[in-house]
Each structure stands twice: as C-alpha cells, then as structure tokens.
Amino acid sequence: MEITKPVLLSGIKPTGDLHLGNYFGAIKQQVELLNSGDYECLIMVADYHALNFIQNREQMKKGIRELATGYIAAGLDPEKLTLFKQSDVSAHTELAWIFETITTMPYLMRAHAFKDAEAKDKEISVGTFNYPMLMAADILLYNTNIVPVGQDQKQHIEYARDTAEKFNRIFSETFVLPEPMIIEEVAVVPGTDGQKMSKSYGNTIPLFGSSEDVAKAVMSIVTGSGTDRPENVYKIHRLLKKDSELEPLYSEHAGKYKTLKEALIDDLEKLISPMRAKYLELQENPTYIDEVLERGAQTARTTANKKMGQVRKAIGVA
C-alpha cells in the first residue's frame, strides 16, 4: 500500500474476552484516530504473542475470531484500516530473529515481563524472554510512527526505538523510530478491585457481556467503607462522563454505594448495548470475518515484504 499519512499500529493478544480496559485503554483511541482521517491505521491480532499463554488449538482459533469480531463491533471499520493476524505475515518472526542477533541478554533482562516472571519464580519460556524483539519487529516492519499504549506499556516502544537505532547504526538507515501515544487520563483503567483492569487479575467488566454480566461485575466493585464516595466506582464512571456531570450525582447520593453503582450500570449499558448488538450480528457471519482478515493479511504482507527486502539487503543476504 502507498503510505501518505503517518502510520499508526496497535494490537491485542487474543487471550480472552475484550473488556472495558481494552476499550478505554486502546480501542476508543484507535477508533477516534481512525475516524480523524489523519493516520494510516494497522490493527493486529497478536496471535504469536498469545502462544506464550495459549497452547490449545481450539482456544486459539476461538480467541482470534472473537477478537477480530470485537474490534469491528467496537467501531474499527475494516474498510478504513488494515486488520490482520500477526501469524499471516511471516516477516514478523523473520525480523525478530534478525533483531535477536544484535540484542544482548542483559538488555532483555530489563523487560518488565521478564522481571515480573523472575520475581514470581516462574519457569520462563524463551518466548517470554524474547517477546520484546517480536514486538519490535511488529512495530518496525510497517514504518510505524505512532503506537497507542498505556503508560505501563511505554517500555515496549522504547525497546522498538532502541532496536531500530542499533540496527540503523550497525547496518544502514532502515527503520523509522516510533513514538508512543498515551492519553494520560485513561492510560490505566481501574478494575473492579481498584488495580489495573486485567484478565489475569480477574477484575474486568466485559465489553460485550450481557446486561446481567455487566451489572454483576459493577456490583462487585470494591468500595471500602467510611467514605461518602466509592472511589473505584467513580474512577470508572469518569471514563464515561465529565467530572462536572458526576459531581452533583455523587454529592446527592453520598454514601449510597448501591445507587451510585446502578447509575454506573445505566451509563455503561448506553455505551455497550450498540456494540453488543453489532457483535452478535457479526457472530452470525463468520465468513465475513475470514474475508476481512485475509484482505488485511494481503495488504500487510505487501508492506512487510518490501521492508524485509531492505533489511536483507542491509545485512548482506540479498
């Protein structure tokens, strides 16, 4: 594809149902940026990254389809962007290997995921250890300018920039240096327990869940005691409404946790119900999802293969 705008790339691992944290931490930004018309957008289903967590064929296939369906239902129009699977573009793993040959183990040992796993005395797979290089390849293959990330993911972009600079210095000027895009007020979306919303913490509010599922998750939000305003409820609520709209509500119902949670449920339902309806409609047409992913793969491969031609020439194998 002929790129005339800054390139924006983002991706999510197909490791479970999308939740409110995915939406406000990434997808909402992606939709707004796509609709602005200012960027060439590539959205990736990061299935090879997911192999560090999912090693079951049916679970992987189900996760990929659900994620692609969810992306579209949440507002990412496949007619306006490139939506593709990481595994459909072999250049990702080829470039990751090339990057690994110029990367030291002490450098990778500074990665947050490795340090977290090491602190928990986990047996660490090579995939977990090397994943920053695969992520760098994901980003750098497409001359990416912008990567929307949460504050806690900023290191990923720093690794990609370091790797690009090192390759450019050793071989030749080949890669664009990407920049993170972080919207501070939604950089970390709180979960039902007050920690960052994450599937691994079991504290999520489902993005396409039924009305009952959403209500159950909201009612489980930890509120503590002895305060008039349930802060964990308010922090999620302010993602949906301005402080100027919420302050009167929370003042009027000070200390009434159930009433305030019900108000949050109502506002979440207004956001989620149209996306839920679209999601259910798309589930009835799996062929369409397959066609979207194949079309995206063809477009992504064209760009990635062109970049790999430059890389192979730079390293002396072509």
Image (cartoon, rainbow, N blue to C red):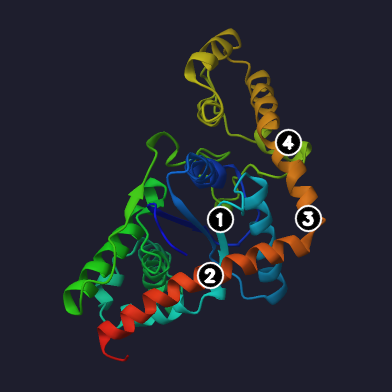
The numbered mark, 3 or 4, whose residue comes first in the sequence reads 4
Q: How far apart are marks 2 and 3 (CA)?
A: 22 Å
Q: Which residue is more in the foreground, 263 or 241?
A: 241
- The residue where tag 3 is placed is 283
Residue type marked 3: Gln
Element carrying mark 1: helix
Callout 2, which amino acid? Gln
Q: Which residue is drawn at 59% across and 42% down?
A: 20
**Residue 32: x and y, percent?**
50, 39
Residue 248 seen in the current view: yes
Label 1 vs label 4: CA separation? Answer: 25 Å
Q: In this view, does 140 lie above or below 152?
A: below
* Residue count near mark 4 (Cα–Cα under 10 Å), binned few <14, some 14–19, many ≥20: some
Disc on the earlier residue, 1 or 4: 1
Do tag 4 and tag 2 residues touch (Cβ < 8 Å)? no
Q: Where is residue 247 in the image (x, y as percent from the top left)?
A: 51, 13
Which label is found at residue 200? Answer: 1
The answer to whether mark 1 and mark 3 are in CB contact below 8 A is no
Q: Which of marks 1 and 3 is nearer the N terminus?
A: 1
Amino acid type assigned to the residue bearing label 1 in the image: Ser
Label 4: which residue? 273
The answer to which of marks 2 and 3 sits earlier in the sequence is: 2
Q: Look at the numbered disc 2 and give the secondary structure of its residue.
A: helix
Q: In the current view of this chain or complex, which residue is farthest to the bottom?
A: 317
The percent position of residue 316, horizontal first and vertical second, equals 26, 90
Q: Answer with left or right where residue 277 lies relative to residue 87.
A: right
